[in-house]
């Protein structure tokens, strides 16, 4: 009941605030009309009558020297200003080699809000330039007050790849061999798409990223210290993938794709904007050629050694797309809706030979697939006071997953078959309100609820004389419910002396209920309920020019998700089994960060140092187990169970920036280093073999050269150290590549070539675990060398309008853990 009262209080606050008089003066033409229109025209050369493309059109209130907005003309000389309130305006037309032309007044009224001023002839000046090309570009990496932005559109080596390939280049982000993403070495990251969660992440976020073509991505945002406005989940922060979407008048679009020796993908965007209505569609696909990897695994348990050599052949394919539509009723009321879908599948065929007390071979097949859609509706109401806004968002995510595998053993173990199916439904309701109180203070407040309902069914089959027969004793059903209710308030204070403060407080209440069902085990339902107060504070000062210094504190929680809590054992690998822990507590982290950002001409530099303390640290702990082969023979193995092992203190620093040593050549790079110093407690002290303080790191370096004839060449490399746990290390990962792109048709079309890892076909990945009674090592070789061709083509008008900022759902609130785990779609496992 109290959460309903919280929600109602914010609604009441919004409408009380609406009744207050605004602090801003009326817009041109009067005080807050509800009708908006557009102003358009066509710019031509007065002598040749040829259209002038890329002319700059600025619009001012009549009598004012401060512009309201600006656009550029398209290839036909057309321009349009959208969302213009009735009033009197002044237009200026600027073009290199031509004197500026002023048109004043241009008048629109309530009865005629749309104005087409027709042909605008511009006379050439006396010293007209023969030909001048002016192109404005965003930097590859931008550092903003609350996030770092990597502009994928500026990275030519990204074309033909996937989101996973791009993320390794983003500052402070690293990706391991399995596609698991971490920020500053912490895998507790929440990944959003266009500011919203996707229900697909309930199964396998690593495969979600592989399913997104890089050509579909506009930029990637990294938020390391989110304010109280964001969900409290994710100790490492938030990664937001923003897809391409043009805000133009008329019809426009693009086609992108790539064909290579390792993977292929394609993507198409189509956008339509007419007045107050906009519609955009997108569809993309990904297909990898089958790849064969080799592995060499050795396990020693109580002086009993087992060694396994194997190969696996994996093929992947995926398709995803979206349809988005919106309508601006007037200047104050906007509605948007987006339907996003995704389907991915990968198939694995493997074989292995094991030398143990009872030698055996294993032939395995597995099919993993997941389908998901996210449907959201967002409504925004803007008030007469500038900056005052009320947003209401809803989202329904629905996903189905399947993980079917079969292991045929020649000896030692009975052959097994396990079919796992999962269903995930997630319902989100969110209300946000923004109220500027004065020029000094701005208040933001909101409430949110997330309701999750997950079901996993694991059907186990026994091998009886070559036929698989359903086994009800080991099959299981797992029902999992999670409800999160939250309210927040954030106050922004702008002080004299270029100081600003962002202070926030968030309250989150979590209810969890799990119901494991198995007729042979007496497993009881379990429930958890906990409340978390999450403060945040940012203190920033602007120094000379655009240089800034910033001090940030944030508290974050990491809730264990389904695979961490599932009490059924996953036996897909008989001698390396895993199991969840229903008694896990959420991780709690406190981060303190000092950040400095500076600009030196065309170069920029960002440096930060930070300290993070994590309590209730969750790690998988491997312990020795005995596996009964028959009445007289046993085998040794391990069981990895997730535990709250203690705490960790980490000191770190990151440095990234760009420099242009000479014209047309830019170098961009970043490096991040941090310490790992776990402090296990209780029985986990004995499991710790990684003693001392360890330094881990990751980095990226890129060089870009612009050549004559619209040629661009790039080279890059990124990598990171091995990731540690209290029992051992996980593999390090590094990759390098080069690319060349040629542009045509006034840069509307391009073709390119990309090469990854040209001097070595395979990459080696080493990992190890050591604990009392256990030691194991693993060496895996994966093919990575790739040669590919890419292409892109854009069509339609290029006169961009000013988009309304879209608000929506961003459920950044679950620990995803080992993002490449195959726990059966959305949970479950073979129970023995």
Image (spheres, rainbow, N blue to C red):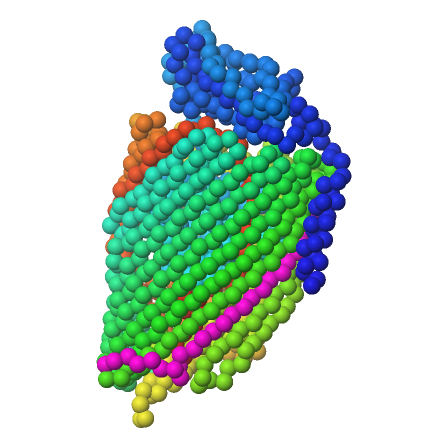
> Which residue is painted at 54% across and 68% down in the image?
481
Asked if residue 613 shows in the view, the reply is no
Q: Where, quadrant-wise, is the C terminus in this rendering?
A: bottom left
Q: Is residue 666 left or right of residue 560?
A: left
Q: Is residue 412 magenta?
A: no
The x, y position of residue 135, in whole percent, is: 43, 27
Name the one closer to the observer, 365 or 98. 365
Residue 326 percent coordinates (x, y): 51, 40
Relative depth, front residue between 353 and 211: 211
Location of residue 726 with respect to 394 vertically, above or below = below
| Vertical relation: 53 (above or below) 744 | above
Q: Position of residue 356 (x, y in %)?
A: 28, 82
Q: Is residue 443 above or below residue 462?
A: above
Q: Main secondary structure of the magenta part?
A: strand
Q: Nearer the viewer, residue 152 or 459?
A: 459
Left or right: 543 in relation to 92: right
- The answer to which image quadrant residue 768 occupies is bottom left
Magenta-colored span: 466-492
> Which residue is farthest bottom?
632
Looking at this view, name the residue that lies furthest to the front: 111
Residue 80 seen from this side:
yes
Picture quadrant of residue 492: top right
Which quadrant: the N terminus?
bottom right
Identified at 50% across, 11% down, the residue is 99
Indicate yes or no whether the magenta region holds residue 486: yes
Q: Residue at x 47, y 79 (%)?
A: 517
Residue drawn at point x = 35 percent, y = 52 percent: 319
Residue 551 or residue 30, whichever sits in front: 30
Label total for image: 0
Name the spot of residue 520 as percent of width and height, x first. 44, 85
* Residue farthest to the top, as pictured: 126
């Amino acid at each position: 009941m109290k959460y309903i009262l919280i929600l109602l209080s914010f609604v009441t606050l919004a409408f009380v605030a609406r009744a207050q008089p605004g602090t801003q003066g009326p817009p041109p033409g009067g005080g807050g009309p509800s009708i908006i229109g557009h102003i358009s025209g066509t710019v031509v050369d007065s002598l040749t009558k040829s259209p002038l493309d890329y002319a700059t059109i600025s619009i001012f209130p009549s009598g004012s020297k401060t512009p309201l907005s600006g656009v550029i003309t398209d290839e036909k000389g057309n321009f349009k200003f959208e969302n213009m309130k009735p009033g009197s305006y002044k237009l200026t037309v600027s073009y290199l080699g031509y004197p500026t032309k002023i048109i004043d007044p241009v008048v629109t009224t309530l009865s005629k809000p749309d104005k087409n001023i027709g042909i605008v002839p511009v006379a050439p000046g006396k010293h007209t330039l023969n030909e001048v090309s002016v192109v404005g570009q965003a930097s590859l990496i931008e550092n903003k007050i609350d996030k770092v932005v990597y502009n994928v559109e500026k990275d030519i080596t990204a074309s033909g790849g996937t989101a996973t390939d791009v993320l390794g280049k983003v500052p402070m982000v690293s990706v391991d061999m399995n596609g698991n993403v971490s920020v500053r070495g912490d895998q507790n990251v929440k990944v959003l798409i266009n500011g919203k969660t996707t229900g697909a992440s309930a199964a396998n976020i690593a495969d979600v990223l592989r399913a997104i073509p890089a050509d579909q991505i506009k930029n990637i945002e990294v938020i390391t210290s989110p304010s109280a406005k964001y969900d409290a989940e994710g100790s490492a922060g938030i990664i937001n993938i923003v897809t391409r979407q043009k805000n133009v008048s008329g019809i426009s679009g693009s086609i992108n794709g790539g064909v290579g020796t390792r993977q292929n993908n394609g993507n198409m965007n189509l956008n339509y904007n007419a007045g107050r209505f906009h519609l955009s569609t997108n569809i993309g696909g990904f297909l990898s050629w089958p790849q064969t990897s080799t592995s060499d695994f050795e396990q020693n348990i109580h002086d009993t050694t087992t060694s396994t050599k194997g190969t696996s052949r994996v093929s992947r394919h995926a398709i995803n797309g979206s349809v988005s539509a919106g309508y601006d009723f007037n200047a104050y009321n906007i509605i948007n809706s987006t339907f996003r879908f995704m389907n991915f599948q990968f198939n694995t065929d493997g074989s292995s030979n094991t030398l143990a007390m009872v030698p055996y071979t294993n032939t395995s097949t597995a099919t993993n697939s997941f389908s998901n859609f996210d449907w959201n509706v967002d409504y925004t109401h803007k008030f007469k006071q500038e900056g005052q806004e009320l947003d209401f968002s809803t989202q329904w995510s629905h996903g189905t997953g399947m993980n079917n595998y079969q292991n045929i053993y020649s000896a030692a173990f009975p052959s097994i078959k396990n079919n796992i199916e999962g269903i995930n439904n997630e319902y989100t309701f969110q209300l946000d309100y923004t109220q500027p109180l004065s020029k000094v203070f701005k208040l933001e407040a909101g409430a949110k609820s997330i309701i999750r309902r997950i079901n996993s069914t694991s059907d186990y089959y026994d091998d009886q004389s070559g036929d698989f027969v359903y086994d009800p004793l080991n099959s299981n059903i797992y029902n999992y419910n999670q409800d999160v209710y939250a309210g927040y308030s954030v106050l922004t204070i702008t002080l004299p002396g270029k100081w600003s403060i962002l202070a926030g407080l968030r309250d989150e209440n979590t209810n969890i209920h799990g119901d494991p069902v198995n007729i042979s085990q007496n497993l009881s339902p379990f429930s958890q309920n906990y409340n978390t107060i999450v403060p945040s504070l940012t203190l920033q000062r602007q120094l000379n020019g655009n240089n800034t210094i910033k001090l940030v504190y944030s508290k974050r929680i990491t809730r264990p998700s389904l695979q961490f809590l599932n009490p059924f054992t996953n036996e897909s690998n008989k001698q390396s089994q895993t199991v969840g822990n229903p008694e896990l507590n959420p991780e709690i982290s406190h981060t303190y960060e000092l950040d400095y950002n500076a600009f030196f001409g065309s170069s920029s530099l960002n440096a930060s140092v930070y300290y993070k303390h994590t309590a209730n640290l969750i790690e998988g702990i491997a312990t020795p187990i005995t596996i009964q082969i028959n009445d007289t023979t046993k085998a040794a193995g391990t069981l990895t169970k997730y535990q709250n092992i203690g705490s960790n203190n980490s000191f770190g620093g990151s440095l990234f920036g760009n420099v242009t040593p000479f014209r047309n050549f830019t170098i961009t790079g970043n490096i991040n280093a941090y310490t790992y110093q776990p402090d296990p407690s209780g029985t986990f002290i004995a499991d710790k073999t990684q003693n001392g303080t360890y330094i881990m790191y990751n980095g990226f370096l890129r060089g870009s050269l612009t050549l004559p004839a619209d040629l661009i060449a790039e080279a890059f490399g990124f990598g990171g150290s091995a990731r540690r746990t209290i029992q051992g290390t996980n593999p390090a990962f590094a990759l390098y590549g080069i690319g060349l792109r040629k542009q045509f048709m006034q840069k509307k079309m391009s073709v390119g070539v990309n090469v990854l890892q040209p001097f070595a076909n395979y990459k080696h990945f080493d990992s190890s675990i050591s604990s009392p009674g256990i030691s194991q090592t693993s060496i895996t070789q994966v093919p990575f060398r790739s040669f590919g061709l890419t292409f892109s083509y854009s069509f339609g008008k290029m006169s961009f309008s000013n988009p309304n900022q879209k608000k929506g759902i961003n459920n950044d609130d679950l620990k995803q853990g080992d993002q490449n785990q195959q726990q059966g779609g959305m949970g479950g496992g073979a129970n023995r």
